[in-house]
Image: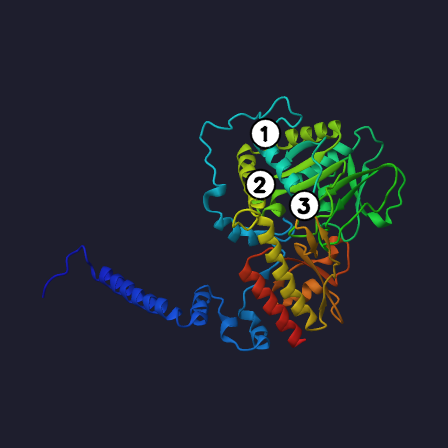
Amino acid sequence: MVAVPSLFSLRHLLVLSLALNLSLILRALYHQRGEDNKWWFCFKKKMMEDADSCFTTSSTSSLHNSTREKVIDLDQMLMICSGDPIMYERFWRQMGDKTTITIPGWQSMSYLSDGSNICWFLEAEFATEVVRLHKVVGNAVTEGRHIVVGTGSSQLILAALYALSSPDAAQPISVVSAVPYYSSYPSMADYQKSGLYQWAGDAENFDKEGPYIELVTSPNNPDGYRRKSMVNRSQGLLIHDLAYYWPQYTPISSPSDHDLTLFTASKTTGHAGMRIGWALVKDKEVAKKMTKFIELNTIGVSKDSQLRAAKVLKAVSESCEEENHKNVESFFKYSYNLMAQRWKQLREVVDAGDMFTIPQFSPAFCTFFGKETEPQPAFVWLKCEGDVEDCETFLRGHKIITRSGTQFGASPKYVRISMLDTDETFIQFIERLSAIQELE
């Protein structure tokens, strides 16, 4: 009997045999998928332990097997963020290296970007692309404004609250927003227990005399409607959070022209991980105080992120400018079509039963697209009808994670659901919502 060399032990031969057999199986499946795409899709889903829905023939049967279905998280990180916009990933993959940047080790080493600027850590390249994009889209006035860059709009909201508060006031200034308001506003205002400002609830019911700060989110998060100030008193100071005032979400009617306006890259282009936002500030002293807050908080904002953001915003502007004379689909046209498709699918499912209702929006002329468009928000403000009093708990029972209306100062019959997840997750959500309607 010939001895097996130590280099090829019995264990090695077994592993090699297994690998060869697996290779033959995968090769056969590869050829099979051309003849039976659905089977191949299910096989891949099975590999991800998520194939139950593929092999059932009715949505009711799929729902019955919900204990074996994956949890669909459409709240994303619970209270931490306002919706993870990963649906845009496909577009940016198609862009290839157009938004790739290389930063040498010696570059951007200083804290300082421009000592002559009020916002001394603002990169000039990023500021240029911010102004350019707003001009291309026509959604904000930038002339006569100071640009303050922040680590996302969350930091800018805190900087704005700090800047608009008076350190000499006898009591903290009230911070209000109309219900349903963005769920993080109360915690942002109260988390540090600042002596400068404090959360005072619903703007519509606010009747306290004296100065106040009103947060105006338009289009609104969570319900998607356009908003204006609700209090309208002489001592009011306004912060306009326009994170969703972009053409994929709502018709652009005119350039916003406010004293203090906030935007964020996460909702504009989907690049939440860059952690970049910007404020357009009319008053020089307010811009100085906002800059001082960020200086004390984080000693500026990452230059690397600003340079990457500048590259991304530039690519968006160029896609819009080239669309008319080149065979190029602009970022906003791509995003608009994707959102329109998702909202159409959702409305079809909701309208097929009487279990749920969602907001109805009126079309309006969009100056960017040059035609009438309908709002299609980044979130759906879904209401459970009938006997369901706690919509979040009800949907959680069907393994759909949402954010309760109570977090927005509203009824528990409402939930907020992100429309910005991957295609796979969105389709699973639509199928499961349809199954719930059939079962109930």
- Amino acid type at circle 3 is Ala
- Residue 349, x across and y down, in percent: 65, 69
Q: Residues within 10 Å of mark 3 (few under 14, many from 20)?
A: many
Q: Residues within 10 Å of mark 1 (few under 14, many from 20)?
A: some
- Residue 96, x across and y down, in percent: 46, 46
Image side of residue 119 versus residue 16, left or right = right
Residue that badge 1 annotates? 124
- Residue 10, x across and y down, in percent: 21, 62
40 or 79, nearer to the observer: 40
Residue that badge 2 annotates? 313
* SS for callout 1: helix
- Amino acid type at circle 1 is Ala
Image side of residue 377 versus residue 45, left or right = right
96 or 46, nearer to the observer: 96
**Total numbered circles:** 3
Q: Is residue 76 above or below residue 65?
A: above
For the N terminus, which image quadrant?
Answer: bottom left
Are circles 2 and 1 on residues that touch, CB within 8 Å?
no
Q: Residue at x 62, y 26 (%)?
A: 120
Residue 243 badge: 3
Ranked by sequence position, the earlier of labels 3 and 1 is: 1
Ranked by sequence position, the earlier of labels 2 and 3 is: 3
Ranked by sequence position, the earlier of labels 2 and 1 is: 1
* SS for callout 2: helix
